[in-house]
Every structure is written in structure tokens, then in C-alpha cells.
Image: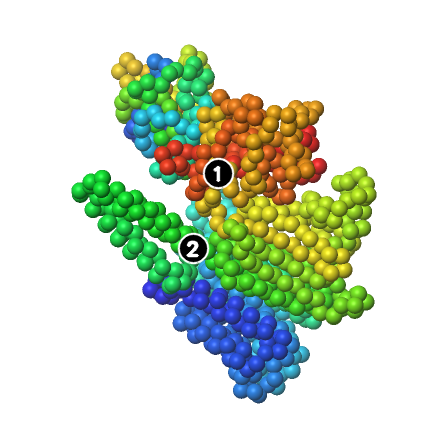
Amino acid sequence: MSDQARGEVLQSQYLTVNLAHEEYGIDILSVREIRGWTPVTRIPQSPHYVLGVLNLRGAIVPVIDLRLRFGLAREEYGATTVTVIITVGGRQFGVVVDAVSDVIDVASNALRPVPDMGTTVDTEYLKGLTSIGDRMVLLLDADKLLQPQDAQMLEAALNAADDVKAVA
Amino acid sequence: MSSVNIAQFHKVFFEESLEGLDAMESALLALDEGGDAELVHSIFRAAHSIKGGSATFGFPDMAALTHEAESLLDQVRDGRRAIDKGIIELMLRTVDCLRGMFDRAQGGQPLANADSDGLKLELAAAAGNAIPAAAAKAAAKPAASGGWSIEFRPHAGMLAGGNDPLRLLRELAALGQLVVEARLDRVPTLDALDPTECHLAWHLELTGAVTREAIAAVFEWVEDECDLSIEPIVAAAPPPAPAVEAVAAPAGAGAAAGTPRAAAASSNDAGSVRVGIDKIDGLIDLVGELVITQAMLDQFREDFDPSRLAMLQQGLAQLARHTRSLQESVMGIRMLPIGSVFNRFPRLVRDLSQKLGKQVKLDLVGEHTELDKTVLEKIGDPLVHLVRNAIDHGLETPDKRRAAGKGDVGTLRLEAFHRGGSIVVEIVDDGAGLNRDAIINKALQKGLIKSGEGISDEEVGELIFQPGFSTAAVTTDLSGRGVGMDVVRRNVSDLGGTVSIKSRPGNGTTFTITLPLTLAIIDGLRSAVGDECYIVPLVSIVESVQLPPDAVRSVTGGGELFRFRGEYLPIVRLHQQFGCANARQKIEDGLVIVVESDGSQVGLFVDELIGQQQAVVKSLEANYRRVEGISGATILADGSVALIIDVAGLIRLQSRRKAA
């Protein structure tokens, strides 16, 4: 925490969303838009949490279900179900959450590390937690949600399979 | 550098000059085959405008070199000197050298190097005529010998001026062979070290034909901020034999000409496309029509009554027609004549045939055939490979040709034309054809086939597309490294095209590349599979059939085959492949679409066909990743997304499964 060491406090804003009665925060700078849930086109051979792709003004954007991503039970989509479109590293993807609730300010010194227990979520997708009043908000690490390294590993494996075939 | 105002014209200047160089090159090649005085004039004009332009835009090195070339050309033009092979060779090297200068100018690097300086002297010598060639070499020699020993001690504050010593070293390394030795004597202990200061010094040894001026020019900006000494290395090392150098340089330049230019071209590509004014006018006309149609349809919004329904329908039909032509015209802007790719071949063929001692006549047909820009950029390398192959392996030496009762000069024909919705490029040579026995032997040796018995000519042709396959007895730098035809095939199929080969023993070989007109929009057949719908590209569809239940044979391992026109084809059930729910299971309830890619066919089992439509291809990879069996996605009329099937990928998948 070098920021704290220098005595500076950085403010950042988070969009909070609800998921299985817990509150999660997504860095607002990576949120591109929030749209109501619309059916998507399924993509074959994708992880179960990738629901499919949707048409975002001409761009083909994958959508993941955050519940499934976190290994929670699937819930029927209702009136409050929304897709949050996130841009990370030039790539866009959508995450489906139960509802959006708020935008909060988080000071960098109010960020706490995640204890390795007690939540329903694998902690590797979290970059910290904070509290707003008596509410606890888990801050998501958006980079890790679609896990490009998964995709890259798969790609590498596919290429390797091609090469094996080429050699044979 | 010149002022900003001039810099903004650099790009246009580069483009025009490169075109000028292309023109010079083709005129020189034509001259080589015996041309008239008009060719000399056109070469002169091109050289003259490059000279003028480079002087205006602040590239004096380029201007100086072109000036020498121009003087020589002037003598030829005035009839004071006859054109001969030597001059043409020299001029071609000048063209290559200028191209290199333009590449460097675009990268903001210094223009002059050993090559250009040497060439300048050679040109001057040729023009002066009084100086014999040997003297020119002698004149060039002092620079060419030993090289230079450079002591470079930057002052401590040099970095603060924004000067990066590493950049200087790189520039020097571009001039010749550079040996760098860092002097660490001034580096203070860690507690006294100020990281913003430069404590290092270098001792450099630069070998190669470099002038002192060229080295001084590298250090021009840091002269006041360093201690610099440039001393010639006393020729303890023997000077490189000039004759060897003179021979090696043009060959190297010729061979290298293809690649760096292509690289430079592609890096510029984001920039611009030159569009003919007629195409723009056509677009404006179409937009005019569209506006009129829109105005007409607008009337109906004001007051519509059912009696005018026919007019409304007519208006909508017109709108559809205009939209389609507008779409075609806009795509047409991306279409460029294949001539721009063909143009590199006269030079390539000339250099190669000289090197191999073969006589080759190159015919280019259909240079005006237009291809999508993306396709055009990627087809160059496969074509170069095929042409090299044809000259290296296909065409014979004059002796062998005479022995086979053919004329001394072999013919290589490149032809591009439209066939249906595709562009076909053929590379035809009248050489020996495929060496059937050599290929079969090699294949046996590599274990690609079990026996040489009963293999059809077609199958022999297919063998050379296998990875690592080469029959060349001697590995040359041209071909025979065993990297080749498989890469050609892969490149072409990445573009959605196919390559096939036809060989007539003793009479030559024909390679046929079939390419789609454009990659951005495809015609597709929308097919339902369960609750989902997939687009099958129309170009790969052979036909669709409904099969009776007994037409399908199951084979061990779970595969299914059906008989189609005398052949057994595997069935790919799309609902299994893609895991679709609620799909029809019985073969008689659905349809089988027979698709083809790379000469192999499979049947895709789908529920039903919905209809034909044009699909604008969107990338899945932009935001997600590659998916096996899917080449992309498109957006349907209702705004939803449909996936496009990658037929070649599915077939590969199928054969992989068969192999496993």
C-alpha cells in the first residue's frame, strides 16, 4: 500500500451489483453500459458460465453469468436481472447479475484484503473488500472474470493439436 | 528535419516515389528484353521526379544518388552511350537501394548507408566513363577497408538532452558490422550513482564500407555532449575482396527486395487506399438514387391509403436494389487490381532464372482482375512461393528442354480471372511436370503412404501439400527446405480459398488458387439446428439432400457414412458437434448439406434450411476467442447473432477424429 505510505488517499468509484444476497463492486471506469437482460446466442464448446454472445451495436460481445462463474446455483432471470457490459484491456464482455444497486466511493485506505474464507466466492476474482455503513462490499477484479489466460491456454492447446496432426 | 508543413506531404511523396520506382523497375526489365527509346525516357522521367521530390522534401542523400543515376540515364537518352546489361543491372540495384532508403525514411532512420555510398560512386564512375570500373572500386576502397575505431564518451548530462546512446549504437549497427565494448571506468559506486546521468562510455569497432561522414552524421546531434574520436582501423585485417562484395550485394538485395518491402507496405496499410475517381462518382450516383427513393417512400408516411400499396411495394423493392448496389460499390472500394501483386514477379523471375541458369518467359494475364485488399495482401507470399517453385522445380534448364524436344525458353504464365463468385489465379509452367516416382519414393520414405501401387495422379499431387514434403535433392536457398506447399495451402485456406494442382508429365504443371471475392460479406444458407440457427457459407455447399433412414451406415467407432454420387461421405451431426438442444435425431427428419473444402466432402446434418441471406462477417475473436468449427458471427435482421460455420475447420476436425 504505497499510497498509504505516502499519506495520499485515492478515491475510486464502484458500481455495486447484487448477486445471491451479497453485494459486489465493479470499478466504474471499466463499466461501459448496463442493459436489461436479453437472450443471447449460445456458443458451442464454451465454458458453462459463458452464456453466449450478443450484438452490441455491431460488435459481437460474449456474456457470462456471474452466478455460474462463481459456482453458485443458477437463478431464473427476472425483471431486475441486468447485463453489465465491461471493457477490460480493449475487450468487451457482459456479466449477468441479479440487480444493480448503487455507485459508491471507495477510498484506497478503506480497501481491505480478502480473508481466505467466509464468502461463497473463490477469492481469486476479488481484489479486496470494503464496508459502506454496515454493508460489506466485495470488489471484483474484472480482469480475471473472463480469464483470458483460460482462453489462451485453450488456444495453445488447439494449436498444439493442429501441429500434432501436421506432424502425423 | 524540415518544418511540419512539409512533413505532412511526406506520405504522398513516398507513395508517389515508390510508384515511380515500380515504374522504373518494370521499364528497366522491359528494356532488358530489348525495348525502345521511349522506355529510357520514362525511366529518366521517374528518376527525375524522385530527385526533385527528395531534394524538396529534405532527403539530400536520396537526391544525390538519383542525381548520379540521372546523369547516367541522360547519356543513354542522348545516345552518347548504348544501354547494356551492365547499366541495367546497375540501375536495378539503384532502384533497390532507393527503395531501402524510402523504407528507412518512413521509419525515420538515416538514409545513407554503405550500399548507397558505394552505388553512388559506381554510378558516377559509369557516367564519367573516364574512370574505369577498377578505379571506382579503388575510390570506394579506403572506406571499405578495415573499418573504423570509434571512442564514444558521452558527457554525464547527455541523457538530459533526450539523446539515447542506445539509439546511436543501433544506427551504427545498421551501417555495418559493429563490435561494441562498454567502458565502465567512470561508473561510480552505488551510493554515489545518479541514475539520471550517463556514466558509461563505449569503444566501438565498425567494419564495412562506411565513410567517415556517415559515422559523423550519426553523432551529429550529440557532438557537443560527448567526446568522440573516429579513427580508421589500420588495415591489419585484410580488406574484403571487392569482387565478392560486388557480386554478393545485388543478389542479396534482389532476394531481400521482396520481404522488407512487403513488411513496409503492410505497416502503411492502416493508412489509405487509392480509389479511382470513377468509383467515387459511382458511389455518389448511387447515394443520389437512394435519397430519391427515400423521399418517395417518405410520401407514404404522410398519407397512406391501401390503394397505393403497389407503389409502396415498388418503392421498397427499389430501396432493396439500391442498398444492394451501394453495398457492392462500397465493397468495391476495397477491391484492388491483382496487378499490384503481379508486378513484383518480372523482377523475381529475372533474378531467379539468371541465378539458376534457366531461360524463362513470364506471361501475366488478367492483371486488372480485382481482389479484396485483405486477400491481396495475403496472397502475395503464397504466389511468390509457387512461382519460385515453378522456376526451381518445374522448368528445366535449356539443355534438358532441348533434349525433351521443347524450345530453350520455358514459359511461366500467371493468370487471374473470375469464375462464378470466385477469383481464380493460375500458375502454369510448361516444364517437366511432377516427378511422380520421386514423390512416391519420398512419400514412402516419410511413411505418408504404405505402397506406391495404384496411386492416382491426383493423389500424387495431394502428397506435395503434406507438411515437410520436399523432393529437392539439394536444398537451395530458393526452395527445398521442406517448408512450403503445406504453408501455401494453409495461407490460402485461411483466406477461405483452395489450392489444387494438375500435372502433365513432360508438359508442365498448373497450380490453381481459388479465392472468394471478398471476406467481409458472404452469401450463406441459414440452417436450423434445434433451437438455434447457423449460417453455412454458400460457396462450400455442394448440394442438400434428404436421406432415407437406410442410406446411413454406421461404422465402428461411432462414425456414420452415407453414399453420395458413388462415394461414401462422413456425416457430421451439427447438433452433436455443437451440443444443440431439441434437435431432430432421425436422419430422415432432417436434411444433409453436402459441403466441400480442400477437395474433401462431408455431410452436415441439420434440421431444416430457413433461407439464403447475405451475412456481414464479424469476428468472435475480437472480444472472445476462436471457437472450433465456427469462423465468425453475423447479425440477423432481428438484431440477434447467428454463428457462421467454418466448413474447412469442421472437415479438419472430422478427419482428426478419424485419425484418432
Is B547 displayed left or right of B644 in the figure?
Answer: right
**Number of other residues with Cα within 10 Å of mark 2, as a class: few under 14, some 14 to 19, many 20 or more:** some
As rendered, which of B539 and B245 lies closer to the eye?
A: B539
Q: Which residue is located at x 81 percent, y 41 percent?
A: B451
As rendered, which of A144 and B45 lies closer to the eye?
A: B45
In the rendered image, the quadrant that contains the N terminus of chain B is bottom left
Mark 2 or mark 1: whose residue is earlier in sequence:
2
Q: In what element is the residue under mark 1?
A: strand
Residue flagged by tag 1: what amino acid is it? Answer: Leu
Q: Is residue B491 above or below residue B212?
A: above
For residue B363, what is the image quadrant?
bottom right
Q: Is residue B273 above or below residue B657?
A: below
Q: Which subunit holds the residue at mark 1? A: B
As rendered, which of B581 and B220 lies closer to the eye?
A: B581
In the rendered image, the quadrant that contains the C terminus of chain B is top right
Q: Which residue is located at x 59 percent, y 65 percent?
A: B364
- For label 2, the residue is B332
Q: Is residue B590 above or below residue B501?
A: above
Residue flagged by tag 2: what amino acid is it? Answer: Gly
Q: x, y percentage for residue B136?
A: 62, 78
The label shown at residue B525 is 1
- Mark 2–mark 1 Cα distance, whole angstroms, equals 23 Å
Answer yes or no: are tags 2 and 1 on the same subunit: yes
Q: In what element is the residue under mark 2?
A: helix
Is B590 displayed left or right of B638 in the figure?
Answer: right
Tag 2–tag 1 contact (CB < 8 Å): no
Q: x, y percentage for residue B410?
A: 70, 66
Q: x, y percentage for residue B285?
A: 32, 58
Q: Which residue is located at x 48 percent, y 77 percent?
A: B45
Q: Work out whether residue A32 can be spotted.
A: yes
Q: Which residue is located at x 43 percent, y 43 percent?
A: B614
